Amino acid sequence: MSKKHIIVDPITRIEGHLRVEAIIDENNIITDAYTSSTMFRGIETIVKNRDPRDIGLMTMRICGVCTGTHYQRSIEAVEDAFNVKIPKNARIVRNLIQGALYLHDHVVHFYHLHALDWVDIISALKADPKLAANEALRWTDTPYGSGEGDLKKIQERVGKFVEQGRLGIFSNAYWGNKHYKLSPEQNLVAVAHYLQALDIQRDMSKMQAIFGGKMPHPQSLVVGGVTCIQDIQNPARIAQFKSHLVKINDFIKNAYMADILMAGTIYADEALDGTGAGLKNYMSYGDFRLNDNDFYSSELLFPRGIVLDGDLSKLHPLDQTKITEDVSHSWYDGKGEPDVGLHPYEGKTVPKYTGLEKKEDGYAYLKTEEKYSWIKSPLYDDIRMEVGPLARIVVGLAAKHEGITSAATSFLGKLGKQLGLGKAAPASVILSTVGRTAARAIETEVMGNVMIDWLDELAANVASGDKSTWTEFDFDKVSKSARGFGMAEAPRGSLGHWIVIEDGKVKNFQAVVPSTWNAAPRDYKGRMGAYESSLIGTKVADPEQPLEILRTIHSFDPCIACAVHIIDSKGRELSSFKVNPNCNI
C-alpha cells in the first residue's frame, strides 16, 4: 500500500499559525491527520499578580479578531468571583456589542477567509453577466448587488487584475482544481458579494464602536457593567446602530444566506455523505442572557448543553467542573498531573518545547508520538468535543429551541426544494463540512433578527427612566480570596476564562478558547481533536493542491493566537515596520 505524507504549513486565511500533516492512501483518502499550533501565547502568565479589574484589557489581546469576547469573559469571571450582578441596561448593551461582533466575524469569515475554498475566482471571468444575474434570482427573490450591470463591472474589475498580474490575495490559489463545482455564473455572483462584503464590514465595525467605544479592542466594559452612559441615553446613537443593522441584515438575507444555499446545493453530495463530520460530539456553554438571572438560571438565545454521537434527540446538561486540559501531546510540562489533566482553576502553563524531527528527506515533521502542538487538549468528562456555530445549532435543535429550530428548518426546507427532494433535506446534512459552514450563516440570520428586538428593549428601558449601567461594589471587601469563571460563546465556539484571586491580585488565570477545543492534538488516550477527526476519510483530488484540507479546516474558522511580540533576551526592539494606508492595491 502506497501512502503519502502531506504537510500544509502555514494554513493561510486564518488568525494565527497552524500546521496540518495528513497521511493519504493510494486512493488519495486521508487516513490519519495531525494539527499543530506553532506559536506560544502566554497571556496566562502575563496577568498573574495583576489587579483583577484590569485583566480584561490584557486578555482581549489574546485575539485580534474576537477581542471583545475575551474582554467580556474576563470581566464576567471577576464578576462571578465577586458576586456582582450587572444592571439590565449593561446586559443588553453587552449583548448588542457581542451580537455585532458575531455578524462581523461570520460575514468576514465566509467571504474573506472561507469562500475561496468553494469559489473559483478565475472561473468567474468566463461567466455571462446576464445569465449570472438570472442565477442570483434562483437563490433569493431580492438579490443583493447582483444586477447584470453590477456583475459586469465586477467581472471587468477582476479581469484587469488578472491581466496585469495583480491578483494580490487571490494569487497562488488552487484555481481550476476539479473539486471546485460552481458554474462560472455562480462564481461571479459569489465574487461580487465577496467584494461587497468589504464595504459591509465597515458598517459592522461602526456598529460595534457605537457602544464599545472603538473597534477592535472595545473599551466600554468594566467589572460591574458598562461605561457608555451617554450613548444609551442618546436616541440618535441608538438610531444610528439600527440603521447599520438594517443594512447588514439585508446583506445577510440576500447575499450571505443566498450564497450558502447555492453552495450547499451544489456541494450537497459532500453534505449528504457527511464529509468533514469529525467527532460528532458537540458542546455549547450557551450565551446571550435574555433576563437578569445568573449563568445557570438565565434564559439564553443559544441554549447550553452537550450532544453526543450526533444524536439530536437527547440533550445532556453542562457542568463546568467536568472540564479539564490534558497536555500529553502539547508542549507543556504536565509532570504530576492526572491523565485527564487539570481543571482550569488548578491549570498550569509551563512551556516544554521539544521541537520537530528532521527526517532523511530533509523535511521537518511533527513528533506525533510525543508532543507536537502549543494547544492543550481539553476534555469534557473525559470526552473530546467540537464547539462553534455547528455545535450551537446542534444543541439548539436537541433543546428544541424555537428560534434555532425555525431557522434551521427553514434552511433545510429550501435546500430540499433546490435538490428536488420533495421535502426538507435531512437534519443530518449539517453534520459535515458543508453543514458547519451553513450553521454559521443560519445563526448569523438569527442574531441579526433578534438584535432589532434587543435595541428596542434598550430604548424602551431607558425611556422608562432606568439609566443605570453599573453596579457599585466594595473591592477591598470582596477581593481578599475568591475565584470565578466567565463561560459563554465566542463566534468560534465555547470560551471560558477562569480566575483565582488572593489578596486582591490574580493568583491563577486560565483561558480555554474555542480553538483549544477544536484544534487540539491527541489526548492521553490517543484520541483525535475536532480538526484532526474531521479530516479522516476525506478524498483529496490532487495531493499537490490539498483544497479539501483547507475547506474543512476553514469551516471551523481557526483562530489560533495573535499579538506575539518579538524581542531579544534583553527586551530591545529588533525591527520596526511602516505600513502605508494610502497604497492602492
Image (tube, helix red, strand yellow):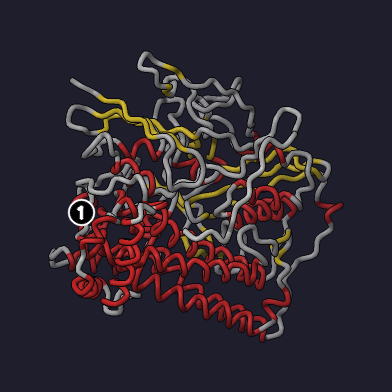
Q: Residue at x 67, y 77 (%)?
A: 232
Estimate the x, y position of residue 403 in percent, counting from the top left.
Answer: 40, 69
Q: Residue at x 63, y 84 (%)?
A: 236
Relative placement, left or right, of 435 versus 77 is left
Quadrant showing the N terminus: top left
Q: Is residue 473 shown above or below 350?
A: below
Q: Residue at x 56, y 66 (%)?
A: 205
What amino acid type should be assigned to the residue bearing mark 1?
A: Lys
**Circle 1 residues within 10 Å: few <14, some 14–19, many ≥20:** some
Depth check: give the residue in front, 171 or 525.
171
Q: Is residue 129 shown above or below 544?
A: below
The reply to whether residue 326 is in sight is yes
Depth check: give the residue in front, 523 or 303.
523
Q: Residue at x 73, y 62 (%)?
A: 224
Estimate the x, y position of residue 271 in percent, counting from the top left.
Answer: 24, 52
Residue at label 1?
A: 181
Estimate the x, y position of residue 30 in percent, counting from the top left.
Answer: 26, 33
Which residue in the rendered view is the most extreme toward the right?
476
